[in-house]
Image (cartoon, rainbow, N blue to C red):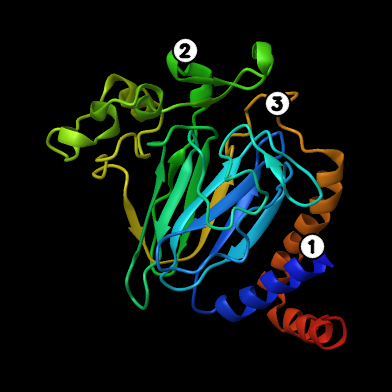
Amino acid sequence: MASLSLLLSLTIVSFFTNSFACTFLITNNCPFTIWPGTLSGSGTPPLPATGFQLDSGQTIMVPSTPGWSGRIWARTGCTFDVTGVGMCQTGDCGGKLECNGIGATPPASLFEITLGTGDQKDFYDVSIVDGYNLPLVAAPRGVRGACNATGCIEDINMGCPRELQVIGNEGGEGGVVACKSACEAFGLDQYCCSGEFANPTTCRPSFYSGIFKRACPRAYSYAFDDGTSTFTCKASQYNIIFCPNSGMRRIDGGLQSTIVEERRTSKINDAVASSSTMLTSFPILILIIVVFFTLYYWP
């Protein structure tokens, strides 16, 4: 029933919001499973899915509402039991499958957006201010005219300075699974843009933020990196792709879900992916299916 409930919820919301709000098409192009999470900003409702498993090669469509503001990221190295309790190596949100209002534990690569209402434009960016765990690209589909894609396609973990490295397994067998920000690693105001450095005049790019910026010129590398990192658009859809180059190495031992969780959530992902494709091509058919299940099978 859990799979059916999530499928119906996403399908109903997708159908009734698709005509006037944009959707997020989240794709896992990594050679391993990820667990995307979503966090709504203050004053905006949560998305229909706040945390879920996404196997390699899978895509899910998540509808939004006008004016929605928040973050989307991917967790790695997760294990959850049948109740959705567990932990992740990177991007963890309180040890739960569904984040339910809890943000990503740094380091994590973030897609951030505030959707415009009416004719107002969206503001969006990809941020590695809180560190980095996976490459990602956000590509909007413009309602009127072209829009700029942004993101961070380089595998920063490969060149992460030793003092910022997060190692996957004990003994280092899992390799570097994330790269901390200098703020998290050292806690100094000059790296955190806090205290006397809490303004764009005194908080300047550091040696460490420079490493991130050279690897990912369009992504936020420190708190006041607005000029080259914030983009605007009026979009109907944002394609968010993790590991867009698909050249990342598989990290064994830390990036596979438990067998129980894979069986439990793969059905959800397959059902939602299937409904998303049908929604795009056959909206009337989807509505008929939703009404049928609602009338005859909804508990």
- Report which residue position mark 3 lands on: 250
**Is disc 1 placed on a helix, strand or loop?**
helix
Measure the C-alpha gap from mark 2 to mark 1.
42 Å
Q: What crowding class fits label 2: few (fewer than 14 Cα within 10 Å), some (14-19), or many (20 or more)?
A: few
Which of the 4 quarters of the picture holds residue 210?
top left
Q: Earlier in the sequence, mark 1 or mark 3?
A: 3
Q: Amino acid at mark 2?
A: Arg
Image point 67% across, 19% down: which residue?
A: 169
What residue did someone put label 2 on? 162
Seen in the picture, residue 130 relative to 17 is either above or below; the reply is: above
Q: CA distance from mark 2 to mark 3?
A: 21 Å
Q: Which mark is residue 49?
A: none
Number of callouts:
3
Query: How many residues crowd mark 1 within 10 Å: few (<14), some (14–19), many (20+)?
Result: some
Q: Which quarter of the picture shows residue 142?
A: bottom left
Which residue position holds label 1?
Answer: 271
